[in-house]
Image: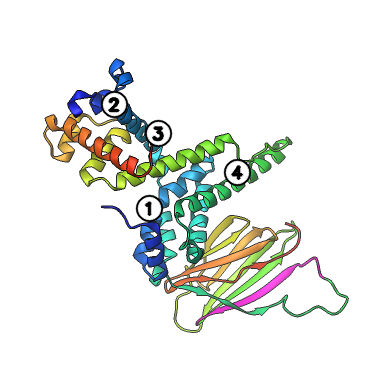
């Protein structure tokens, strides 16, 4: 019975006495209090900003449609002439397609051996391509930006590695096939 | 009321339920965000880890439907990304200061942080299974700073001042039972 043991208030206020040593029930309740204190004390710091949560929820917009774009052009696709090896790539141009949307992606090496990615979303229909969120993942990092009024986006100073681009459109998220830029990271 | 298990939510996501995806995100949002914070990353880096983990989760939903528990998977991915970012920051700082970078392998401190993250999620899950009134009482008791007075808490809950103690004991008892049902051993 609750009355026979220390009340939660007594336990909470840290009033410990001989009863606590001998009473398994009180010890049990004290352990709940400790776990709540430890497990809840940081909770105000663990709350992500609401806008951030909404952004992530938007990944699943439009009935969780997850459109996979296909590469329709890749400047690295043509085979090199026999005996020619290009291990120092300076640029790569890709065009991907998903439904009525095209995604142009251009990677250019900069002076500091990093890469600048310039892309454009274009639509064959009247779909809006301005203000669209674009996410690029590489090496466990993530950069985000939005397209401008022409559907263009830029990611400066990327390392040479594999990139995964995700575009968050109203009609569903579009995933471009992963592609790499080999070279010095 | 108990929320649906993760496997059901993942199945619902894969069947096109936007609501199920939102439930998953809201269930684990604090868990995921707490990891880069515990790794002492900046707010901006913590936001980056948060987005990146959920993007991976969204991308991997098909393969996640068969795993028993989503929580350890989320922890593993968030720890990996946080750790990597933390290492990058240390290397940059070391290069700037001209000192050798500190070894940033997962050590006992990090393992303790992971234990803490799991404990926090246990508390959240237990809290979510309490009635709204009990949630408010427990939240006021353990999470609010400063602690509200009994009179203020009674007024907020529409209770008489005399019954706060009884309500609190009953809620704590219920919470303890839930914690034990979830596997917590006192």
Q: Which residues are magenta?
A: A86-99
Q: Which residue is mark 3?
A: A38
Q: What's the CA distance linking mark 4 and mark 2?
A: 42 Å
- Pick the front one: B90 or B172: B172
Same chain for the residues at labels 1 and 3, yes or no? no
Same chain for the residues at labels 2 and 3, yes or no? yes
Q: Which residue is mark 4?
A: B86
- Pick the front one: B186 or B79: B186
Q: Secondary structure at mark 2?
A: helix
Q: Secondary structure at mark 3?
A: helix
Between marks 4 and 3 in the image, the one whose residue lies nearer the viewer: 3
Above or below residue A185? Residue B92 is: above
Q: Secondary structure at mark 4?
A: helix
The answer to whether one can see residue A38 in this image is yes
The answer to whether one can see residue A12 in this image is no
In this picture, residue A35 sits left or right of residue A9:
right
Question: Residue A154 placed where, x, y %?
Answer: 59, 65
């Amino acid at each position: 019975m609750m009355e026979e043991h220390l009340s939660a208030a007594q336990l909470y206020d840290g009033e410990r006495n001989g009863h606590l040593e001998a009473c398994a029930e009180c010890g049990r309740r004290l352990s709940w209090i400790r776990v709540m204190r430890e497990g809840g004390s940081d909770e105000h710091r663990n709350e992500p900003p609401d806008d951030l949560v909404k952004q992530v929820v938007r990944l699943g917009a439009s009935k969780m449609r997850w459109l996979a774009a296909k590469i329709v052009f890749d400047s690295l696709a043509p085979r090199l002439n026999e005996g020619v090896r290009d291990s120092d790539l300076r640029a790569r141009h890709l065009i991907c397609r998903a439904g009525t949307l095209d995604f142009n992606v251009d990677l250019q090496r900069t002076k500091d051996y990093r890469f600048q990615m310039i892309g454009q979303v274009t639509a064959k229909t009247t779909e809006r391509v301005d203000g669209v969120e674009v996410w690029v993942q590489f090496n466990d990092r993530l950069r985000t930006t939005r397209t401008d009024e022409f559907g263009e986006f830029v990611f400066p100073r990327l390392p040479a590695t594999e990139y995964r681009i995700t575009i968050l459109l109203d009609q569903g998220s579009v995933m471009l096939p992963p592609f790499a830029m080999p070279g010095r990271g | 009321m108990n929320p649906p298990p993760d496997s059901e939510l993942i199945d619902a996501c894969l069947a096109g339920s936007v609501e199920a995806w939102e439930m998953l995100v809201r269930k684990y949002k604090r868990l995921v965000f707490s990891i880069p914070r515990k790794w002492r990353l900046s707010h901006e880096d913590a936001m980056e880890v948060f987005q990146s983990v959920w993007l991976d989760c969204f991308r991997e939903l098909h393969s996640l439907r068969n795993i028993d528990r989503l929580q350890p998977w989320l922890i593993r991915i968030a720890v990996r990304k946080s750790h990597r970012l933390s290492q990058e920051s240390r290397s940059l700082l070391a290069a700037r200061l001209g000192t050798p970078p500190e070894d940033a392998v997962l050590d006992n401190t990090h393992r303790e942080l992971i234990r803490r993250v799991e404990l926090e999620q246990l508390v959240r899950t237990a809290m979510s299974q309490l009635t709204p009134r009990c949630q408010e009482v427990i939240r006021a008791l353990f999470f609010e700073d400063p602690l509200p007075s009994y009179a203020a808490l009674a007024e907020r809950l529409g209770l008489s001042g005399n019954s706060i103690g009884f309500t609190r004991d009953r809620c704590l008892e219920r919470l303890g039972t839930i914690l034990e049902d979830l596997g917590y051993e006192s």
